[in-house]
Amino acid sequence: MVLLTYCYRIKPNAEQIATMERWLELLRRHWNYALGQRLDWLNRTRCRVDRCSIVSEAIGDIAEPVTYYSQQAALKETKKLFPKYKQIYAETQQVNLQRLNKAWDRWRKPDASGKRGGRPRFKKPGDLRSFVFPRVNNTRAGAHLIDGVLKLSRIGSMPVVMHRPLPSGFTLKQCTIIKKADGWYCCISIKDDTVPELLPVDSVKSAVGIDVGLEKFLTTSDGEAVPIPQFYRKAQNKLAQAQRLMSRRVKGSKNWQKAKQKVALLHLHLTRCRKEFHYQVAHWLCSSYDLIAHEDLNIKGLARTKLAKSIHDAAWGSFLEILQAVAVKRGLLVEKVNPRGTSIECFNCGARVEKDLSDRVHHCPICGVKIDRDWNSGLNILNRALMAVGLPLNGCGKSIQDIEEQQVSFVNLRSPHHNL
């Protein structure tokens, strides 16, 4: 099964924009009320086993657990007390509660590795920027997309900028309406029940190991390197200027809202430039190799260091997710390897060559190999991946002399919108 999401720009009129903004505000208030119910139940029922609290204690009977089903059943009462909620499509309100329930479960229930998510937060005005129609193009659906026109229940019809056609053979599953800094968008989730056939391991003709970094975005085991664009670093002056202008305005005023909009547009532009760059690099790798290996990095842990800004700017996690998605669509293989010691071990003899982060050249005193540090890491990543899938080690088809003589080349894969 393949699940894809296509995002299109929509052009609602002024009345439809006002309706959708009113929906977002009402759904935000309902989210906060439902979250308050859950937190209140948790505080009233929480008690230490070996002692009683001297600060506060639950009064009366112990409240029943607050679940998604109890809050969904209370929607009828909510609509009686607040008639404005009758204007919102019923399934949209249910999905809003389902989102809260998922966030609550991530906080309360650990996953398979024992980790839990953060506590769900109350949303300020403007924090909720999307709502969902869970069914599209069927008899009981609240959204219909036909011939470039999106018809939403209780909102109306609006044109859609179909910059690319929907693929044939897929089933439209759900429609998410999103408010971004530069307008409104609809994200259509589509599903294909056919399972894509991955390339058999025996048919792999070319393999590569990639080492992501901050000096270069990535270095391959073939000695090619992609320069890091540093979109955020290059836009810091413009962002600082726009944020200073916003801070000098009276908060909540019209001028403050205009300045805030400019800051949001800059951040949106950076996000799109980075995403386009990631897709270009991912397609380049998938067009050149059948098997792509990378390190299974703990990016959240690395982002807590003093290099956090540069790591967030490079966005390795987003790139690896995009690489995985592009490879699956093409039927290619992506292999994760243990990152421990890839930059220390010599790819040729396996000796450990300790080096600081400032040492950019790998020089092995045992076998005498002297190559770029990141290139050495890419070769180690490739060797570990080949061992994991059961393919023979072949030194990427190059001799040690070829590797020593080859100079690291730079592949200029840049977004067409990277100049800020």
Image (cartoon, rainbow, N blue to C red):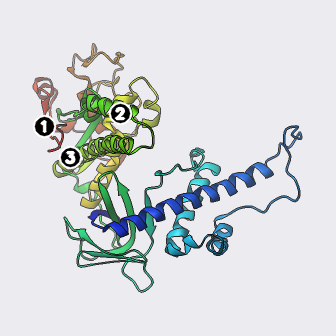
x and y percentages locating residue 97 in the rendered image? 57, 64
Q: Residue at x 41, y 37 (%)?
A: 297
Camera-nearest residue between 15 and 237: 15
User: How many badges with numbers are in the image?
Assistant: 3
On screen, residue 288 above or below 55: below
Q: State the residue position of label 2.
A: 243
CA separation, marks 1 and 3?
13 Å
Q: Residue at x 65, y 67 (%)?
A: 71
Asked if marks 1 and 3 touch (Cβ < 8 Å), the reply is no
Residue 285 bears which disc, if any?
3
x and y percentages locating residue 400 in the rendered image? 16, 27
On screen, residue 352 above or below 169: above
CA separation, marks 2 and 3?
37 Å
SS for dot 3: helix
Residue 412 bears which disc, if any?
1
Q: Residue at x 33, y 65 (%)?
A: 186
